[in-house]
Image: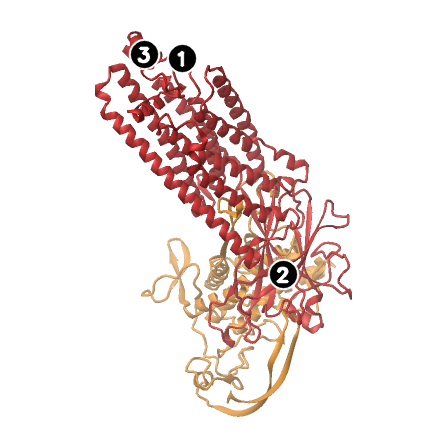
Amino acid sequence: MAGAIIENMSTKKLVIVGVILLLFQAFSFMVGGLIAPSPTTAVYYLATKCVDTAKNHQSTKWFMPWGPNQCETIRNFDEAEALKIEANNIVFAVHIPLPNKEMSPWFQFMLVILQFDIAFKMHNQIEDGALATVDVGLAYRDDTLSEWTEMAHSLEQRKLKCNFTTTKNYENEGRYYECDLLPFMEVGSVSHKYYLLNIRLPVHERKKINVGIGEIKDIQLVGIHQNGGFTKVWFAMKTFLTPSILIVMIWYWRRITLLTRPPVLLEKVIFALGISMTFINIPVEWFSVGFDWTWMLLFGDIRQGIFYSMLLSFWIIFCGEHLMDQMERNRFSVYWKQVGPIVFGSFCLFIFDMCERGVQLTNPFYSIWASDVGTELAMAFIIVAGICACLYFLFLCFMVFQVFRNISGKRSSLPAMSKARRLHYEGLIFRFKFLMLVTLFCAAMTVIFFIISQVSEGHWHWGDHTLQVNSAFFMGIYGMWNLYVFAIMFLYAPSHKRYGDSQSGGDTGANSGEEIQLTTTITHVDGPTELYKMTGKEAQE
Amino acid sequence: MNAEYVLRCLLMLCFALFSANASNWLYLAKLTSVGSIANEETCERLRGLIQRQVQICKRSIEVMDAVRRGAQLAIDECQFQFRNRRWNCSTLETMPVFGKVVTQGTREAAFVYAISAASVAFAVTRACSSGELEKCGCDRTVHGVSPEGFQWSGCSDNIAYGVAFSQSFVDVRERGKGQSSSRALMNLHNNEAGRKAILSHMRVECKCHGVSGSCEVKTCWKAMPPFRKVGNVIKEKFDGATEVEQRKVGTAKALVPRNSQFKPHTDEDLVYLEPSPDFCDRDPRTPGMLGTVGRQCNRTSKAIDGCELMCCGRGFQTEEVQVVDRCSCKFHWCCYVKCKQCPKTVEMHTCR
């Protein structure tokens, strides 16, 4: 058994494989950019001001902003003052979606952002650190005639972060404060057709509830959900990718089990990478169309987290396995120093995600950013994760540097070798560098497209076609990492070919002696690739 | 029955021809007696609409309440922006709402047209967002073809609908008269400039909601500016408005600056054809020209609200007035104010 496919494959075949992969890559970009609509939609809602005429507000009455059962509404609060309506009697009602539309399970998630329109008044300004206490109820129904069913009810506090950009004088009364957007609600599945939000801002002077929050003129909500079309294209892509990665994974593992030796660490790590890719690929989201699984959002986060940490670990181990001497490598424990930050960092992010999206499973209005302690805690988790990421990249860069130093060291001794061996090593070095370049290319593409999608307006017009940049980014990058994993599993699978069979040109027949020599000198090195043998040998020397 | 209809049409036509210069539909704001514009017959009874506007009213009856609120908004904002000027946007209870002040192609007319076109777009967009209207956003796809509408790719912004409605409803008067008259060109330009004041000041807001709330997935949307801001923008454009005249450019007629030294106006600037009168004295022949007699002024100011300029050199009288001010108040966020009453003496200056 001589080595991996990447070593024994001819350059021509390698180029063919590369071109096919590139074609698939372009295809996934096109699917995202031309077929799928933009990933998400934001819908703007203006809350209707309803008047609750009942004496006690404990009743489970729901207020509809429009339609046949419309509540008793007021246009503005000047009207309310004239009618002697108090703040406690006012209910802000928002129906999601707007009339004549229906929500759909294809929307996957729904998050709602709250914004207050607060007018500046000289005598009634927003106090420093003012807290708005929001009494909010969420209800759903599936046809326009049935009763509303309560889904969640909560008393939430949100910190008002508003500033007034012009000078505070009588002249500027009536201008609005500029307030930060407040996270309001997040639901992990949209399994009902109609949703209704009833928001109250109860005032309690003695308990200092909702005092000093200025003069609220309006409440605006922004509902964000994934586009149904994007979800469908995304699912289609996942459903197509799952079997392709699964098949190459099974094929890869079968090849490894056919070997006489037990699998080495790098082979196991590549296999684990394949598993995590498959795990993220498997389109379990199909179930979210039929079932009301609110934890799908959290589950998706966890799957992505596992894949990212697996990919980062793979890079470290890939570099490390090409670097160290034989005595130390091939054990996972050797890499604790480098893999540790990854595990710890992703664990921090996991805890943070559990605190935010985990709690949202029971209370969709919960936000860790709403309280001071929560904000500090969340920031702590994110900062620790950031430090871990920095540490990781320092380690990685250092390792890559070491590998390249070793390779160039080896290169200087190449002329002294026999021809077959030299060609072999040169090919190896070329292909290792090639793979490093591919990795760098993928990472760079991800970063570049990320920046483009952040900066650009979302869609480009190109003749008659509209290119959805954000969808192209998601589909393209997702397809790219799939192809990357695919290529690694394919190229690093053990080769059936006898060593040297596919070596270029003239030395095919004449190198059997050379081969024996080559294998005997390094028989104790039993890595998956010849490059191991090379670097391992050098380390011994 | 038939003859009555013809007669009414004729009357409408005459009316439209004679008073077309004033933005009469603003009179909707004064129609408090009409409860809500709920059926098509109400459309015909609305004073101030020309025939084509009545047709629009019948076709999109649900929007008319929003249009009326828009008219009110326009008048309120005009009065706020002009509170310190000689002409303070005072309205009459008759039609046209601003009297004959805006019938000439003055700066003031430019402002009124711009603010009213903007206010309709604003009010209709707001009505869309609060769910009052049923055909916003989704039937006018901005992002090209969407096979299944809302479920596939969401709807376009409501502002697109609001602006389009304003274009069809407000501009229809000028379009009806043919494009040739310089006044029609001026009105159309100012209407569009008013709507641009909203469109070019839309706030882009974004929310990140990727894994753990990272910016991997970011959604942005456009939010309308508060109407006070729109008013301020149009007021700034009023202060820097360009005097224009009609000239032939190629085959079409266009408005070009009267003074060729000035750089040409942009789409967002206001244009006017005639210089404004000084608005100093009451003119019985021009309803709405109330003059500045009896207006309050500011003694220390050197600007237009100062007594010097406001009273057109006629001088002013000063008296000490006892006013009851509200002080040490307790407010709730809505509808509740508890204050002490603090009487105080202020000097009040009024123009002679």
Give the x, y percent position of residue A360: 62, 48
* Residue occupied by mark 1: A497
**Viewed as shown, does residue B248 lie left or right of A471?**
left
On whether disc 3 and disc 2 are found on a single subunit, the reply is: no
What is the secondary structure assignment of the residue under circle 1?
loop
The red-coloured chain is labelled: A
Q: Which mark is residue B66?
A: 2
Q: Determine whether the residue tagged by mark 2 lies in a helix, strand or loop.
A: helix
Up/down of B294 relative to A234, above or below = below
Q: Which residue is mark 3?
A: A515
Q: Which chain does the residue under circle 3 lie in?
A: A
Q: Residues within 10 Å of mark 2 (few under 14, many from 20)?
A: many
- Residue type pointed to by label 1: Lys
* Residue drawn at the location 43% of the way across and 83% of the way down: B301
Type of the residue with mark 3: Glu
Q: Gap between marks 1 and 3, in whole Å?
A: 13 Å
Residue A46: x %, y % from top left: 62, 57
